[in-house]
Amino acid sequence: MKIKNYSLSFITVVLILVLIEILLRVTGSNPRIIRDFSLNEPITNIPDKNLGWSTKVGQHIFKPWSEDGKITKLTINEDKSRFTGNGNLHKKKIIFIGGSVTQGWAVDDLETFSSFIQKKTKKYKINNFGVGGYGGFQSLLLLEEIFNNYNDIELVVYGFTPHHEVRNVAAGSWMYLLNFFSTRGFVKLPYGSIDKENNLVKNKPIKYIKLPFGNRSALIAKLEKKIMKIKSLQREYKKFEISKSIIKEMNKISNENSSEFKFLLLEELPKEKIDKYKKFLIKNNIALINCPMPQGDQYVVKGEGHPSALGHKIASECIYKEIEILNIN
């Protein structure tokens, strides 16, 4: 009798799971699928045990993003910075760090805001160390490496956009997008957290959880996402405080290396949010460069969505004016 009851219970559980699986499929959920974008665009990143990934040295050619678009080049120098023009390598440097907007994703080498600034100055070498997919925490780790290689940096500019906050804490939602909707494939992501005294804690790269049969079951794939979300929930709740700690650390190591540090806002924020950042920056004596990318169809790359060459040019004029106090001519 007991065996019969156990069998009935087992069959009932299996049927319930099958029904849930069918319901998930019908409503649009799918098993874990790693989408291969490599046929559409070149691989521009390589795995890095400290940073998660880093830029791949060489010239990368992109097909037009739309029917009336053009071929674009993304050239990565030996020091992992993007080519910004033929500035004097022996002169003092202004470096930009940040994500894909800073890097200039989807526009040509000489159409990024850092390249436009390089055209305006002969006194400084402008280095673009932006990396697609980076937030503030990876930018901080990269900055530490940069200072190990250079001692002639006059100014560090961190290009911030709002989604850097979820990247900084390895939020489950970002880990999902990163692993399944990019050319990077299955990557690890380092993240920041804070201790009880609000000091920044640097955590080693973690990877997205893969459960058995997640590539065959929508239910298991959904469970993977849920686990990642729960594991990062506490960090995500503190993402603003953690992001502030990261920016403070950027400023600290810049000053320790005799470099000035500035916070560049590249995207409009709600008034309440920008007021919070302004208050924080003033309190920590960090200069704000408020030069968000212009909005509108003409300012984004058609068929892709990142800022266009025109968007970068307009932003560069604003940024240049803000850093003119260094007499960068």
Image: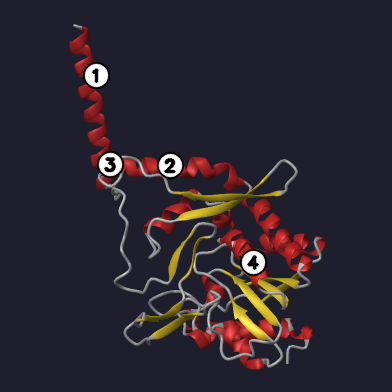
Amino acid carrying label 4: it is: Leu
Sequence-wise first label, 2 or 4: 4
Q: Tell me what residue is drawn at x 69 percent, y 59 percent.
A: 272
Residue 233: x %, y % from top left: 54, 43
Q: Tell me what residue is drawn at x 55 percent, y 68 percent.
A: 99
Residue 46: x %, y % from top left: 44, 65
| 173 to 250, vertically: above or below | above
Q: Tell me what residue is drawn at x 18 percent, y 6 percent.
A: 1
Given this view, does label 4 or label 1 mark the residue nearer the observer?
4
Near mark 3 (Cα within 10 A), the count class, few <14, some 14-19 or many ≥20, is few
Circle 3 sits in a helix, a strand or a loop, which is it?
A: loop
Circle 2 sits in a helix, a strand or a loop, which is it?
A: helix
Give 135 or 146, whichever is nearer the viewer.
146
Sequence-wise first label, 3 or 2: 3
Circle 1 sits in a helix, a strand or a loop, which is it?
A: helix
CA separation in Å, label 3 and label 2: 16 Å
Reading the image, the residue beneath label 1 is 9
Reading the image, the residue beneath label 3 is 213
Amino acid carrying label 2: it is: Lys
Given this view, does label 3 or label 1 mark the residue nearer the observer?
3
Reading the image, the residue beneath label 2 is 226
Q: Which mark is residue 143?
A: 4
| 214 to 308, vertically: above or below | above
Residue 278 in view of the camera? no
Near mark 1 (Cα within 10 A), the count class, few <14, some 14-19 or many ≥20, is few
Sequence-wise first label, 4 or 1: 1
Quarter holding the C terminus is: bottom right
CA separation in Å, label 4 and label 1: 58 Å
Q: Is residue 17 left or right of residue 280?
A: left
CA separation in Å, label 3 and label 1: 23 Å
Amino acid carrying label 1: it is: Ser
